[in-house]
Amino acid sequence: MNQVVILAGGHGNRMKAVIPKPMLEVLDVPMLGWVIRSCEGAELSRICVVTGYKAQYVEMYLNDRYRTAFQAEQLGTGHAVMQAEKFLREFDNGNTLVLCGDAPFMDSETISQALKFHESHENAVTVITAELDDPTGYGRILRGESGLAAIVEEKDATEAQRAVHEVNSGAYWFRTKALLELLGGLSQSNAQGEYYLTDTIGLALEKGWKASAFRSENPEVILGANTRKDLLYLNAVARQHVLEKHMENGVNFVCTDGIIIGSDVEIGAETTILPGTIVKGKTKIGAKSTIGPNCLIENCTIGEHVTLNYVQAYESEIEDAVKVGPFVHIRPNSHIKNGVKIGDFVEIKNSTIGEQTAIAHLTYVGDSDVGKKVNFGCGTVTVNYDGMKKQRCEIGDNCFIGCNTNLIAPVKLGKGAYTAAGTTVTKDVPDYALAVERADLKVKEGYSLKKLRSKLFPDSDGGKN
């Protein structure tokens, strides 16, 4: 059986983070999550994650999906793998992949191809490498006639060795039995007093075992993050790859300034994404829509021919030919049906809005079931919270709701019902009825004149003479 050990116990002091470094995010997914996805894509499901600094954050993220092993002291990469010894011994007849939890761009194809290379060459250990134009800072791969000769860290390399452009990614395939034996031979005889996994190469060669390097076609497999600057670069790389993928699929970008699209987002052809737009999570957008400028969309399903302008929408469904914005907030569990028009300064929450309904401006619709072809006047509010619990409003097809109407939930407007401007509705309104609730208008003539006399007639004696 083939299995994986992912090293995710690092603190990352230079990040100045309160969570483990592998839990820092690239395009809203923890770096550890990227690594796990690549393993799953390579059909590797037996995974052990080595935790350390604030392990509870990693464990909460994994949510019992995979095994963990705890590294109480940070004594090097070799020491981290030692903590997974029990996991390794359970199935020691296959191969084990060791990956770094803070190297998010290790891809499934590289993992699979490296395994084939590892098995076909009958290696005890195979190092995954990449060739860089600028290898500064990375351990160099030294090859010999029979395969891998050594990995030399830059600080220990000669001038000739520094000229080598093939570098160590920090990822390895091992024969599991060989790995267990090699771990037993590691020592702390170095300046840092740590157990280095790279030392397994020399130990394997001393035993006469085969060690080789597999060079990935993807140079980004070596990219990791030790500083916030590194993390920013990883986000920039990931962002550009996602944008390019969508362009290849027919998505249009007039300008990419401020546009961030998550790696799981799906977008249909001929849709335009305008500047300042952020699309996250499992969002799916249909064809020929226009999203932006300055939208934030998270975990939504959006249909075709939709226009969203200055909209924030979360965990909701927006059907075809809907026009929304500007300055609209669509909160979770909302369903906006075909042909709806929503104008400026409107908030929708946990509600269904029927086909071709119009909510023009300055309106709140919360916890409501709205029929089709309803017209909301400016300033309408569904008063859905009584201080103890939320209640729902039901609004039938073809209703006309006058400006500044308050619907005090739970209340129902029947089909074709009207409400007069300024009405507060506290009981159900039958089909095709008009609801009017106003106090009698009282007019006190001359009232304001008394207040404004000094302003209107500054040179007078105020009417005293």
Image: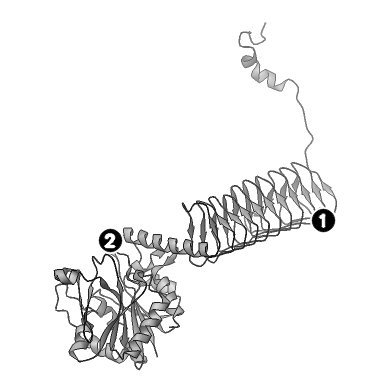
Mark sitting earlier along the chain (1/2): 2
Amino acid carrying label 1: it is: Lys
- Closer-to-camera residue (90/248): 248
Residue holding disc 1:
415
Q: Vertical placement of 247 versus 46: above or below?
A: above
Amino acid carrying label 2: it is: Arg
Residue holding disc 2:
14
Identity of the residue drawn at 69% across and 51% down: 341
Q: Vertical placement of 397 versus 34: above or below?
A: above
Q: Is residue 159 left or right of residue 68?
A: left
The local secondary structure at tag 2 comes to: helix
Where is residue 214, by image quadrant? bottom left
In the rendered image, the residue lying farthest to the bottom is 93
The span from disc 1 to disc 2 (Cα, nearest Å) is 63 Å
- Residue 7: image location, x then y, percent: 33, 76
- Residue 389: image location, x then y, percent: 64, 59
- Residue 224: image location, x then y, percent: 32, 67
Question: Colour scheme used in the picture?
Answer: one colour
Identity of the residue drawn at 25% across and 75% down: 73
Quadrant of the image containing the N terminus: bottom left
